[in-house]
Image (spheres, rainbow, N blue to C red):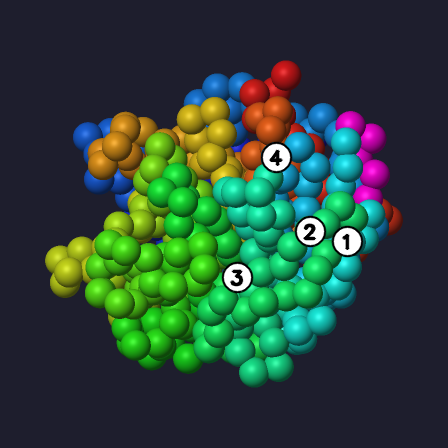
């Protein structure tokens, strides 16, 4: 039976509890929301407050091994990457038949690294190209490969030298409405990298489709779009505005509205409190035991955020338009029901596909894990 969560109100000052954001945690919820618009949400996040509650309408696939990246082809088929096996899967048609189309041999799974994000070329009908973010033996990198029917071709690196670590490897890829490729990276546990603009660690990068620094980037001939990040694993666009979800350390996980050239504060600040010093504060923060946010998607007026340690799906309404966009009051769903939730993607029919991550060494796998759930964001 589907369950929703009533998130506890905090009327007085917020109490910050929790261990490291990468580990599995409990279900007690304390939410802080910061908002730069004229609308200031209360400290109480209530399931269903902003409209219909989401409903799981089906299971797309089961018995997967840490599904990490997910993208849709123009014909509606889906491409899925598995972090630890380095397999690339194709999910076909209405019956959701699963086919292995190949493995990415230059991926070297270890720790939190392996075969991570995938993005489908905006020109896929012409070039049949897929983009992968992976951990090799020496670095994190972005590679391309052509998909010819049910066969994945050889990979070609387009960006190498992203710092590699046993933790905090980033890994999300997304093409923006500008046709450029955006990539999230982590600081690998070396927090100094996040503030070093010469390093690719702890950043959001903006690249041309061939992996070069994109025209109009804020730091000249550099792929860096924003910096001061700890470990970003979710990217989503709302009417051209980029948003990102980010792991905190032991205090606050973050949802950030990303502006070019801005510094998001890590490791000087975790969560809010840096605006007076020239850093950009997050739009919303969570205690690390209810989030550890990974995938991020936008549908039906809200951002949907998969929580690993928090084992839930967060809905965050987006208030305002254009440059005035801001985060509304977060709402929690499916608390503890499906375990760790990692990737969230909007399918062509408007439903959400959400992957679980219970076989990643930090979860409690059940029969059928890992799986991909199909969720109607409008409850219908």
C-alpha gap between disc 3 and disc 2: 20 Å
Q: Residues within 10 Å of mark 4 (few under 14, many from 20)?
A: some
What is the x, y in percent for residue 65?
77, 58
Q: Which residue is under mark 4?
A: 74
* Magenta-span inclusion, residue 346: no
Q: Residues within 10 Å of mark 1 (few under 14, many from 20)?
A: some
Q: Going 83% across and 39% down the picture, which residue do you hit? A: 97
Q: Which residue is under mark 3?
A: 171
Mark closer to the chain start, 3 or 2: 2
| Span colored in magenta | 94-98
Whether residue 205 is visible, yes or no, is no
* Left or right: 223 as drawn, with respect to 143: left
* Left or right: 310 as drawn, with respect to 227: right
C-alpha gap between disc 2 and disc 4: 13 Å
In the rendered image, the vertical position of residue 252 relative to residue 302, given as above or below: below
| Pointers 2 and 1 in contact (C-beta within 8 Å) | yes
Q: Going 47% across and 35% down the picture, which residue do you hit? A: 298
| Pointers 4 and 3 in contact (C-beta within 8 Å) | no
Secondary structure type for disc 4: loop
Q: Which mark is residue 147?
A: 2
In front of the other: 230 or 336: 230
* Left or right: 12 as drawn, with respect to 190: left
Mark closer to the chain start, 4 or 1: 4
């Amino acid at each position: 039976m589907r369950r929703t969560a009533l998130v506890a109100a905090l009327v007085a000052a917020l109490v910050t509890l929790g261990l490291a954001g990468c580990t599995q945690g409990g279900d007690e919820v304390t939410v802080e929301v910061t908002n730069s618009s004229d609308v200031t949400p209360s400290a109480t996040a209530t399931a269903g407050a902003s409209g219909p509650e989401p409903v799981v309408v089906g299971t797309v696939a089961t018995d997967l091994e840490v599904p990490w990246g997910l993208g849709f082809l123009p014909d509606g088929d889906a491409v899925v990457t598995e972090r630890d096996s380095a397999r690339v899967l194709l999910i076909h048609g209405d019956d959701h038949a699963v086919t292995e189309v190949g493995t990415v041999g230059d991926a070297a799974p270890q720790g939190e690294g392996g075969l991570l994000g995938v993005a489908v070329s905006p020109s896929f009908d012409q070039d049949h190209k897929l983009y992968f973010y992976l951990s090799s033996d020496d670095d994190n990198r972005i590679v391309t490969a052509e998909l010819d029917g049910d066969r994945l071709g050889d990979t070609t690196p387009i960006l190498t030298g992203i710092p590699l670590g046993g933790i905090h490897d980033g890994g999300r890829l997304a093409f923006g409405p500008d046709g450029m490729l955006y990539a999230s990276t982590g600081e690998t546990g070396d927090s100094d990298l996040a503030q070093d603009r010469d390093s690719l660690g702890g950043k959001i990068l903006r690249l041309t489709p061939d992996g070069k620094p994109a025209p109009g980037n804020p730091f000249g001939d550099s792929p860096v779009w924003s910096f001061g990040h700890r470990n970003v694993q979710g990217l989503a666009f709302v009417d051209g505005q980029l948003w990102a979800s980010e792991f905190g350390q032991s205090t606050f996980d973050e949802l950030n509205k990303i502006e070019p050239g801005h510094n998001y504060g890590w490791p000087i600040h975790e969560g809010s409190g840096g605006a007076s010093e020239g850093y950009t504060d997050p739009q919303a923060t969570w205690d690390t035991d209810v989030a550890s946010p990974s995938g991020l998607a936008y549908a039906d007026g809200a951002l949907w955020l998969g929580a690993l340690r928090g084992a839930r799906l967060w809905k965050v309404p987006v208030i305002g338009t254009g440059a005035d966009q801001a985060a509304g009051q977060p709402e929690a769903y499916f608390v503890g029901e499906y375990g760790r939730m990692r990737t969230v993607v909007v399918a062509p029919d408007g439903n959400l596909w959400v992957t679980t991550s219970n076989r990643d060494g930090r979860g409690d796998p059940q029969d059928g894990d890992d799986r991909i759930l199909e969720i109607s964001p409008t409850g219908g």
